[in-house]
Amino acid sequence: MLKYIARRLLHLIPVLLIITIILFAMLQIMPGDPVNAYLGIGSNATVEQQQQIRELLGLDEPLPVQYFSWLKRSLTGDFGTSYKFRKPVADVIGKYIWNSFYLNVVAMIFAFLIAIPVGIKSAVKKYGLFDNFWTVFSLTGVSMPSFFFALILIFFVAIPSKWLPLNGMRTTIYLAKGYDSFGQEVLDVLKHMILPVTVVTISSLASLTRYVRNSVIEVINQDYIRTARSKGLSEKVVIYKHAFRNALLPIVTLLGMYIPGLFGGSILLETVFIWPGIGHVLFTSIGDRDYSMLMAANTFYAILMLAGNLLADVSYALVDPRVRVK
Amino acid sequence: MKKSLVLLLCLVMVASAFLAGCSPKEDSTVTETTAAGEATTAAGEATTEPSGTLIVGITEASGNFNPLYYSSSYDGYVVNMVFEGLVKRNFDGEYEGSVADSWEYSEDGKSITFHLKQDQVFSDGQPLTAQDVVFTYLVLADPSYTGRYSSAVKDMVGYDEYYAGESDTFGGVEALDDYTVRFNFKEALRVNFENCTYAILPQHYYGKDFTPGNTASVEAITTDAMGSGPYVISQFKEKELVYLERNPLYVGEGYMIKEVILKFVDQTTDIVELTSGGVDLLAGVIDPKKISEARNSGFTLNQYNRSGYGYIKTNCEYGPTADAKVRQALYYAFNVKEFVNSYYYDADTDQVLAVTQYHPFSQISWAIDDNLVNSMIQYDFDLDKAKSLLDEAGWKVGASGFREKDGQVLELKIAAMPDHDILATLIPMWERDWGQGLNIKLTVAYLEFNTILDYVIYNSDANVENWSLFFLATSITTPDPHTLYTSFHSDYIGSGMDNTSRYSNPEVDRLLDEGKAIMDIEEAKPVYQQVAKILNEDAVMMPVYANIYFDVYAPKLVDFKTSSLYDWVAALKDAKIVE
């Protein structure tokens, strides 16, 4: 098993290198100029001044030189300075990414907690009223754009309630002057999380419920389930002990694939709810041609994606003895 | 099965550990007590003590509050609250003393000497002296300076040598004694004065590790800004808010609001935040729907002309628009009034919240008078006139159904931004009037903002054949019409420069050169009016709208007077909170 993991890890290195080269090349192909984008329209900097800034930022070097100096610095943990924020990239990303993470992780827990029982029940009573209700519900959830759903919640739930916050992550006055206690802060953040978590949960619930349902249906039709039933086991034991365990396999894989998503931000949702997450920061970095931000963030997501894949494979091996034997 | 459960549990635990781990840290940086907040009501009756809290909704500030390096106007609000320059504009747009209390020009007009007030301190208690002014400008002139304000020093004596590394000293700004500072310029120009108005940084704080040739240590101080202005930053929370408190050491008059919170809001819900009490003030609102919502909910409104406008510029160097007749034809066939009257119509008050103008000045420029307005050609919508102009220029309707000349089809390449409300309204109008009305072939390329700038500014030399016209808006922060210089002088044609329409006219160049040296604005006025007349006749630019800005705010904010060049930050000087 360890050997398997080690081999997989070694494979990741060339893949990651190729990804960074492609990313670097894509940024260079983008029209626009980072120096001017940083200075902003109407800066009135003369052409000589612009050229001098370009040299200071190292943007006048040949592209391969720029790439390798980026790589060398990154390997030592220095991801450069954001052109826009004028702070180390790692600081900027680190500040925002956890806010996205809190939101996503809570939403994911809710989504799994709801999707697993709902999926099983729908599978057992396939095409029943319960199943049909969740089918319609899921389809509505997945079809409705999340920002639209968010606006509906703000206007029809938050405003009339006069209690739920419209947006933000913390109450303005506490944010400025501080909380009296840690407990108060947690409660305040949780209160602000209600609406955005609802939106994220419902939009991810749709696919997750269908996934669990189909996986359980597939298992129920297997021979060993018929055998279990014919042994005279109760339906409860058949479903929850025999069927569910086997249906879990694809769901575990899914969990691995969800990991990178936990750190990703949703641009529209974060904008509408003014949630201080990473999505909007990265989106504006593209407009600002903030090369060091974009390189660092995209490489980070690539690593997460690769790690998620690896984790899925490894956990699959852990829960399924058949894979392990091979 | 059990292992996957463990995995899930681990995730939950890790997540809660982060929640638990990060938050108290932020908590510990906050040491404010709530007592201060409670005291405000009592202080409300007191006469001279600042009191009350104002929450302003703004678009997100990035947190770079370094006056020499910030680039977003939202960061600029904070900079203007924390820092002061030698002089600042008053409500009428005229300069008055701020850090300086008087100034005089030298005999030859090339130098300006400022006398500083002697009782001023930065917010850490250290005195503000002429050395701090010299330091600020030394950073701007440094060869390693990477900010956007280097144009402030480029006309000063000794800048070129210092920037090129040929000289160790910069003679542009000199301290004559602790409280007297002199600016030396290469030429005596009216517009030099504006270059003396930049915010002053404390040398002992920003310049601790500064050596000429290495500005990195100055640039590194972003969020922890310190100046001599009326407010100090007490908290900055990324993507959430900036919390400022009255600087107790500020010696100037006014600024009677104790706490100002800049809360970051989103355009889709900002008006709801206002009406639900989440924020007290929204500045620069232009949407008629939001304005009527605020009016109907009992909020107070200030209205003033925007200092700037939205415009169409055409390519005067390449393609059919290089011919002035074609440009005039397009102008006549562009129903600007129809657009403004529908797009900016406010049904509530039966008003149009913008005006149409034909001159290139900001609405508040001193170059505008009746004489100028009357001398402008009003390009009122006239399709027949446009057709005959195109005929005169040799563009006749050909077999293809489009106008042709020498086998070439009359084609306009429009560089447009996607998801842009105004362009989404303009393009169908152009298709109707230019396309069907005048038989011109329109090709619309949807480009993201930065790509358009790449076409017309950053890489304009390489892209000159890729566009015929584009739409952008501009904000002008001065009533001085000298801003036309970089936009229309032929020296500024080329990559990285501002003459985006690539317009070259020796007569305009001459007038602009003449105008910038005239000290007296009454004498300079006719020169700029002449420039406006030429630009108008040549249809180099079509101003589309000059809109009206509204500041909407809760009634508890009183004595709050804003104008085009006196924004809400400046207006805090006289404003009060009455609970």
Image (cartoon, coloured by chain):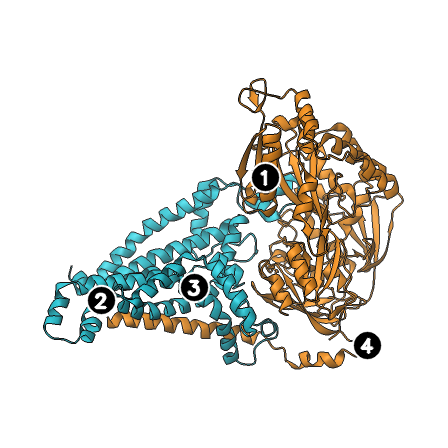
Asked if the residue at tag 3 contacts the one at tag 1, i.e. Cβ–Cβ closer than 8 Å, the answer is: no
Helix, strand or loop under label 2: helix
The CA distance from mark 3 to mark 4 is 51 Å
Q: Amino acid type of disc 3?
A: Val
| Mark 3 residue crowding within 10 angstroms, few (<14) / some (14–19) / many (20+) | many
Quarter of the image that includes the N terminus of chain B = bottom left
- Nearest to the eye among marks 1 and 3: give it: 1
The CA distance from mark 4 to mark 1 is 57 Å
- Residue at 45% in and 48% down: A69
Both marks 1 and 3 on one chain = no
| Mark 4 residue crowding within 10 angstroms, few (<14) / some (14–19) / many (20+) | few
Residue assigned mark 2: A319
Q: In which quarter of the image is residue B16?
A: bottom left
Q: Amino acid type of disc 1?
A: Ile
Residue assigned mark 3: A200
Q: Residue furthest front?
A: A129
Task: Indicate the chain on which mark 4 is placed.
Answer: B
- Nearest to the eye among marks 4 and 1: give it: 1
Give the percent coordinates (x, y) of residue B242.
62, 66
